Image (spheres, grey):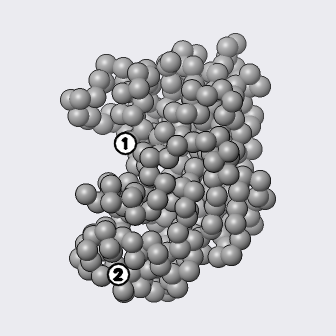
Amino acid sequence: MRLLLVGCSGFIGRELIPHLLKSGYLLTVISRKAPKKYPKSIDTTKLNHLQLDPAELINWEQDKLLCALKEANGVINLAGEPIANKRWTEEQCKKIEQSRLITTKGLVNAMSQINKPPEILINASAIGFYGTSQNKIFTEKSSQGDDFLASLCSKWEQISRGCPQQTRLVLIRIGIVLGRDGGALGKMLPIFRAGFGGPIGNGNQWMSWIHRKDLCQIIEKSLRNKKWEGVINAVSPNPAQMSLFSQTLGEVLGRPSLLPLPAPLLKLLLGDGAKVVLEGQKVIPERLMKMNFEYKYPELKQALENLTE
């Protein structure tokens, strides 16, 4: 099976690309960045790279990109500026939106021009769709929230629904992805290893997390199982409050986790983006549970032990 990957050069892609190559897929990766170097154990002869910006609509008219799309049996679109890396200035919010919406619009429009479009489109979204809450429980059936991220996810998903009717669409609402070399855990590890870790804010907010390896498995299952379509919450079945997350991480590392990061400091660092971390949401992967998806790391301690060994 030949796949076209968009926005897969970042934190998730570093795990996903080797995973798919080992599973025998042929990959074409579209990215603004130059190709990465992979370990010698990875067979990169099955990997092709197109260096261009997918957020520029004109690039979707290039022959080499259209040719790659015509040859693809499936498309994985994870494109998007990181949410919590910078303060949410007006300029940054625009970048967060355009990196997702324009890229997906260009992709969907290009797919619609092909006589035989790809069989499947796996399009990323986020649990930010539901908004934030410290007491509600969200499933795939829950309604949209009313903040910036909820609006963004709704627009993003709506654009992806414009793909050709014969293309199976899987919308993966991704939670907090845990990996050793980036993401939220990557930022927390140096602080906790130094003995200065602790809960963020009051510690009561929910963290709906998922191990990066399990996320890759969900994506591959979506490719292989034709019954998988529509919205899927890509989170562990065991969300944790921030206080428990911090306590567990401290235990795994053998370090104290008593010093909370004050909310005002986080707001100073992230601006409006701090709301996601300070309020959080409790999201349940109802559909994955009904489809009997087998998590490799369903429990928080198990996941953190694997990522810190």
**Could you give the CA–CA distance between mark 1 and mark 2, rounded to whole angstroms?**
29 Å
| Label of residue 31 in the image | none
**What residue is rendered at 69% in x and 20% in y?**
113
- The answer to whether residue 239 is above or below residue 32 is below
Q: Earlier in the sequence, mark 1 or mark 2?
A: 1
Count of labels shown? Answer: 2
Residue 293, horizontal then vertical, whole percent:
57, 42
Packing grade of label 1 (10 A; few <14, some 14-19, many >=20) is some
- The answer to whether residue 85 is above or below residue 259 is above
**What residue is rendered at 67% in x and 45% in y?**
290
Q: Answer yes or no: is residue 49 visible.
A: no
Residue 151, horizontal then vertical, whole percent:
71, 58
What amino acid is found at the position of numbered circle 1 in the picture?
Arg
- The answer to whether residue 281 is above or below residue 32 is below
Secondary structure of residue under mark 1 = helix
Q: Nearer the viewer, residue 106 or 196?
A: 196
Q: Which residue is mark 2?
A: 257
Q: Quadrant of residue 150?
A: bottom right
Q: Answer yes or no: is residue 254 visible.
A: yes
Q: Which residue is mark 1?
A: 14
Q: Quadrant of the C terminus?
A: bottom left
Residue 253, horizontal then vertical, whole percent:
27, 70
What amino acid is found at the position of numbered circle 2 in the picture?
Ser
**For residue 131, side relative to residue 193 (left or right):** right
**For residue 298, side relative to residue 45 (left or right):** right
Q: Nearer the viewer, residue 65 or 79?
A: 79
In this rendering, which labeled residue sits more in front, label 1 or label 2? Answer: 2
Q: Nearer the viewer, residue 161 or 302?
A: 302
Packing grade of label 2 (10 A; few <14, some 14-19, many >=20) is many
Task: Check contact, mark 1 vs mark 2: CB within 8 A.
Answer: no
**What residue is rendered at 49% in x and 19% in y?**
2
